[in-house]
Image (cartoon, rainbow, N blue to C red):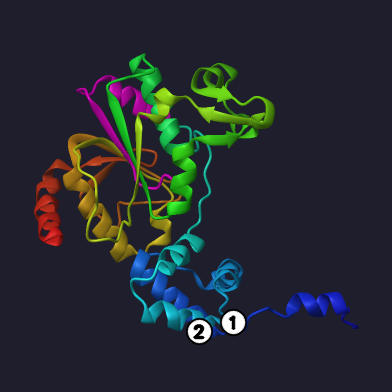
Amino acid sequence: MVTSAREKQETVKEFEFTPRDFERVRALIHKNAGIALAESKQEMVYSRLARRLRATGIRSFQAYLDELESRPDSDEWEAFTNALTTNLTSFFREAHHFPILAEHVRHAKEPILVWCSASSTGEEPYSIAMTLCEALGSLTPPAHIIATDIDTNVLATAANGIYAIDRLDKMSPERAKRFFLRGKGEQAGLVRVRPELRQMVTFKQLNLLGSDWPISGPFDAVFCRNVMIYFDKPTQGKILARFAPLMKPDALLFAGHSENFLYVSDAFKLRGKTVYELDQNRSAMHRAVSRRIEK
């Protein structure tokens, strides 16, 4: 079989990327962000980090990784982490969670406080905010959302609250009209989250593996959806142990559709489909454990 010049060109990589380079990347991102990259992610890692090599002018993965490891305080660590973070999201993703949240906050003591632990570009925390407004019957309800993410790039997008109008395609026209402003002129085709909604959300950078979490509860609900799938089981257990002391006794923990926390923590019990609540018989013990971790 004859291989065309184009096919040969596509198989030749711009930068050499050896199995050893890939294993170094896996070790570094796990150590610094807790992300457990699967062996199948080699092409994804090459594609995303090749952009960093071009941006920094470094001509090999080995030299790039050597530079990272030799400069632990370098700003490039943030760019490295951002490049390997996946940010797939949409408004009202996994929609069955939001009526459960609405019913929960209607019976909760005000003010309401919710933590969205992986906010990505903002669709999830703004979906939470819309749910709180509807449940409590006000555009300015007694409620607030702390939205965090390890990726500083997506946090900037989230704080701006500007999206292509087609991001609202699956949203009812009534909801879209109530909570978004349509762009005109040069901004045609874009929408922006209403200022009342943006004021309900505080965006912060937070690494779930970091020793310091710049947040405080107690929270009525914690959203940790489609995050734990990137961590190994021991790391998941440590994070869940730190969630428990930050939650009100009757708080809810929302997980992603492919996540199961029952086998990594006994601090929680299943309440419904991917919705958990604290196991009161175990939560006191986990509060004590978390305090020791923080010290």
| Residue type at numbered disc 2 | Ala
Q: Nearer the viewer, residue 155 or 244?
A: 155
Residue at 42%, 57% in the rendered image = 229
One can see residue 264 in this view: no
| Residue type at numbered disc 1 | Arg
Left or right relative to 128: residue 269:
left
Residue at 33%, 17% in the rendered image = 136
Mark 2: few, some, or many residues within 10 Å (few <14, many ≥20)? few
Residue 37 covered by magenta stretch: no
Q: Residue 273 location in percent, x, y?
A: 39, 39
Image quadrant for the C terminus?
A: bottom left
Residue at 29%, 19% in the rendered image = 106
Where is 193 relative to 26, above or below? Answer: above
Where is 138 relative to 30, above or below? Answer: above
The magenta-colored residue range is: 97-122
Q: Residue 137 location in percent, x, y?
A: 36, 14
Mark 1: few, some, or many residues within 10 Å (few <14, many ≥20)? some
Tell me whether circle 1 and circle 2 mark residues in contact (CB < 8 Å).
yes
Q: Nearer the viewer, residue 117 or 162?
A: 162
Left or right relative to 61: residue 277:
left
Image quadrant where residue 168 sits = top right
Q: Which mark is residue 165?
A: none
Q: Residue 81 location in percent, x, y?
A: 44, 64
Q: Residue 28 location in percent, x, y?
A: 40, 74
Image quadrant for the N terminus?
A: bottom right
One can see residue 256 in this view: yes
Judging from the image, what secondary structure is the residue with disc 1 in? loop
Judging from the image, what secondary structure is the residue with disc 2 in? helix
What residue is pinned by disc 1?
59
Residue 108 covered by magenta stretch: yes
Q: Nearer the viewer, residue 180 or 224?
A: 180
What residue is pinned by disc 2?
63
